Image (spheres, rainbow, N blue to C red):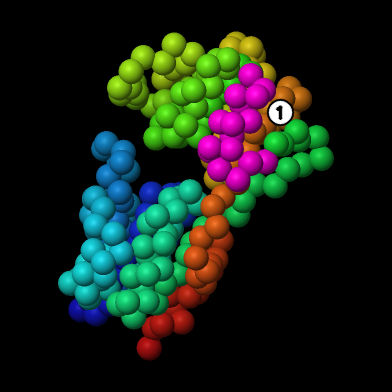
Amino acid sequence: MTSDTILILGGTSEAYGLAKQLVGAARFQHFRVLTSLSGATSNPRRPAGELRLGGFGGSDGLVGFLQQENITLLVDATHPFAEQISRNARDASRKANVPLLRLERPSWTPEPKDRWISVPNLAAAAAWLREHPHTVFLTTGIRELDAFRDCLSSRFVIRTITPPQLAEPWLQASFVQARGPFSVEAELQLLRDHNISLLVTKNSGGSATAPKLHAARQLDLPVLMTERPELPLSKTVSEVDAALAWITSFQA
C-alpha cells in the first residue's frame, strides 16, 4: 500500500529522469510519484507516475496542496530560470514542514576559445544589445521575447516549435520552426544561413542545448550569456542518482 507521496516540480530532463527511476525501481514502490508541470507547453511530454498541470497560486497555494495531498517529500526540479516557483517551493516547504531538495543541472562554463559576454539578467542583455547592434540568434525562450523588442538596430532569428502568438508584429525578427534536439552541424548551418553575428542565450546548462555553444565556438562568434538568478539556499544536487540517495535517506 502506498504510504508516502513525492511531489516533483518538473519540466526538465532531470525531473523526467527522476520520475522514471522512482516508478521503475522496486525499492521505491511504496512511494506515490506525482509530477507537476506549469502547463506552459501544450501537449507536454508525460512523465512516469502521476501528472498534474497548472500553477498552485503562489507559495500559500502550494502549502495547501502539500497538505491536501499529504506530500511527504518535495523535489524542485524546475528549470534554472524558473525563479518564482523555486522561491515558492522554499517558502512552502518551510511552512508545511516538508523536506525539500533542489535538483539542478550544473551551469555551463566558458572554454578557452569561447567569447562570452556575461550579464546578470535579460534586461542587461537587452541594454547591451542597444549599444552593440548585431544579427542575433535569440534562444532565451518564447516567453522572453518582449525584453528585446526595443533593440531596434538589431535583427533577430528566433527558433520555435510552434508559431509564436505575437500581440504586435515584430519587424526585426524572423522565426524558424523546428523541434530539437539539434546537432552541432545543424546549429552551424543555421548560424551560417542567417549570417548570425551574435548568440544570445541563458545559462541553462545541460547537454541537450549545448550544441549551439559548440557551433558559436567553431565560428568564433561572441555569446551574450545571461547568468542564472540567485535562488534561496536549499539542499541541492545535480544528478538524479544523488536525488535518489536523498529520497532513500527518508525510508524507514
Q: Is residue 132 above or below residue 86?
A: above
In the image, what residue occupies the spot 70% across and 36% down? 117
Is 27 inside the magenta-drawn segment?
no
Report the magenta residues as a range. 118-133
Residue with the most extreme left position? 68
Closest to the observer, 249 or 169: 169
Q: Is residue 225 above or below residue 35?
A: above
The amino acid type of the residue labelled 1 equals Pro
Residue drawn at (53%, 37%), measured in percent from left and top?
123
Q: Is residue 184 visible in this depiction of the protein?
A: no
Residue linked to disc 1: 222
Residue at figure coordinates x 43%, y 50% from the top left: 82
Q: Magenta residues: mostly which secondary structure?
A: helix
**What percent of the width, then of the height, locates residue 148?**
49, 27
**Left of 225 or right of it: where is 37?**
left
Residue 126 part of the magenta segment: yes
The x, y position of residue 34, in whole percent, is: 28, 62
In this rendering, does residue 99 appear at all?
yes
Which residue lies at the image location 53% right of the left edge and 38% below the top edge? 122
Judging depth in this view, the residue of 216 and 34 nearest the camera is 216
Q: Quadrant of the N terminus?
A: bottom left
| Quadrant housing residue 225 | top right
Query: Which quarter of the rendering shows the C terminus?
Result: bottom left
Left/right placement of residue 174 relative to residue 209 reads left
